[in-house]
Amino acid sequence: MKKKYLFLAGFAAMVLAACSDDVTTDTPTPTPEPEVNENVVPLEIFDGASQQGRLTLSAGTRAAEKWTRLKEVAQIAPPTEYEDLDWSATAVLIRGDHKTGFVTWHSNRQANNPAEEWGGALDWFDIKDNVPTEFKGVGINKELKFNNLFLYNNNQFFVSATSYKTGATIGRIGFMGAQMGKTVECIGFPGSSVNAIAATNDGKLIAVSGYEGTYGTFAADVEAKPWDYEVAENNKGIEVGTPMSETFGGKYVVVDGTNTYILRNNNDEGKILNVGFEEEFGLEVPLLSADKSAEDYWIDEDGEIHWDLSADKKAYYGKHVLAVKGNFAYVGAGQNGLRVYDINKGNLTWNNETTTTGVFVDDDFVYAASGAGLRVYKYSEDGKLELFAFQVTAYDVKGEPVENLVPGGEYTDEDGNKIDTTPDFHSCNFVTAYEADGMKYIYVAFGQSGVRVYKLDPNAPAEDDAE
């Protein structure tokens, strides 16, 4: 009614002016209100100059380090804007030329009033000589939590996210050269949160959602609009692969060769699903993290969303990553450690007891992050892993690093002295790595502890072997 009234008022003024040159009015012709696209939200951009002090180089390592192969070379602290949101680093992406890096962050708050305590941030920074050197800026939105990041065709970001207005959301952000777009297009998806996105072999994208979740494929130019839970026909553009399920708990998705694998939890057991064949095998253990409440929601008859944090906290709602190489799948099972499975047989080939959630693989190594730090393993043909290098924050009273432990657990050394297993890192959400100049450069998103950057020399001998 408001727009209609303004239009009529403007029309009446024009009629009076046309009928008589003697008639004047001080009432200006109103400007029509611009249409608001509720599926596009702003990305508040802060320039690189405002991010000074967040990057620390040559941070050094503890003197008690046993091996010389792995060194910490940089740290990235959380954004200083809206710091009351307790930013948590969720993912890192390094462009193929190794000259630009990106970090996603989300609010570490679980809240019954998400509109006041949620937010997502996206950093981008320059890399020179394989070390972060200068921030280009950070974009922040307080409606969305950013969970993961995928760069499509080198000019569009797809952010797996959660909106306090609509729940599970795929955020699409333009990126040209070194310029970040100033808006996020919100693509609705079924479930409470989108946790991971990857590119399929047929040129589409695939997303997986968490609690009461599912997975689905879509084209990069899919229309940005909320998910319609009432009329399925309104959701054209996203092909859902399986009905929503309270126990689906999608965590991560990997495309390897011709196969697409999804890591999920069904509360009492983790599972790996081969999407193309609709084949699934159990991991024999659940994916466990620190106890959290499910950020569940319900929609009333007017379409309004209402969030409800479950009073019953569970250990099934944390982040976990899957990596695949050849016939083996590498799972960060949280409190159930790093686990290796033969994909064809569905059986466990190797595991440890070190709390692990972030995992990455390349042609040479497996990189696994825990609350105690970073470990690097070498492959073997039978699927077993050999520890190659590590940087950890738990040491016994003699200053030697403890290789296998659960942070916070009760341990003693061979002389009966208590071992300090207090983790320095908040959570190990994500790991990525690349090779340059014969070295490996590893980035780990450690939640509220920010991002740590490591340099690995694959040819350096262990100290025990050095002359």
Image (spheres, helix red, strand yellow):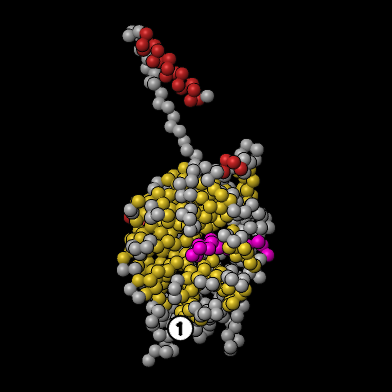
Q: Can residue 50 be seen in this view?
A: no
Q: Is mark 1 on a helix, strand or loop?
A: loop
Q: Is residue 196 visible?
A: yes
Q: Residue at x 38, y 82 (%)?
A: 459
Closest to the observer: 356 or 213? 213
Residue type indicated by callout 1: Lys
* Residue at the extreme bottom of the image, as rendered: 467
Q: Looking at the rendering, which quadrant does residue 350 occupy?
A: bottom right
Closest to the observer: 113 or 304? 304
Residue 175 in magenta stretch: no
Q: Looking at the rendering, which quadrant does residue 288 occupy?
A: bottom right
Q: Which residue is drawn at 39% across and 21% down?
A: 29
Residue 434 at x, y = what percent? 40, 69
Total count of labels: 1
Q: In this view, does 23 lie above or below 453?
A: above
Instruction: Tell me if 34 is positioned left or right of 403 in this view.
Output: left
Residue 135 at x, y = what percent? 35, 58
Q: In which quarter of the image is the C terminus?
A: bottom left
Closest to the observer: 211 or 29? 211
Q: Which residue is drawn at 43% across and 49% down?
A: 173
Residue 81 at x, y = what percent? 43, 53
Q: Which stretch is magenta? A: 253-268
Q: In this view, does 460 lie above or below 338?
A: below
For label 1, count other residues whose C-alpha is less than 10 Å away and answer few (under 14), some (14-19) or many (20+). some
* Residue at the extreme left of the image, as rendered: 129
Residue 335 at x, y = what percent? 60, 70
- Residue at the spot of label 1: 66
Q: Residue at x 58, y 82 (%)?
A: 418
Q: State whether the magenta stretch is mostly helix, strand or loop.
A: strand
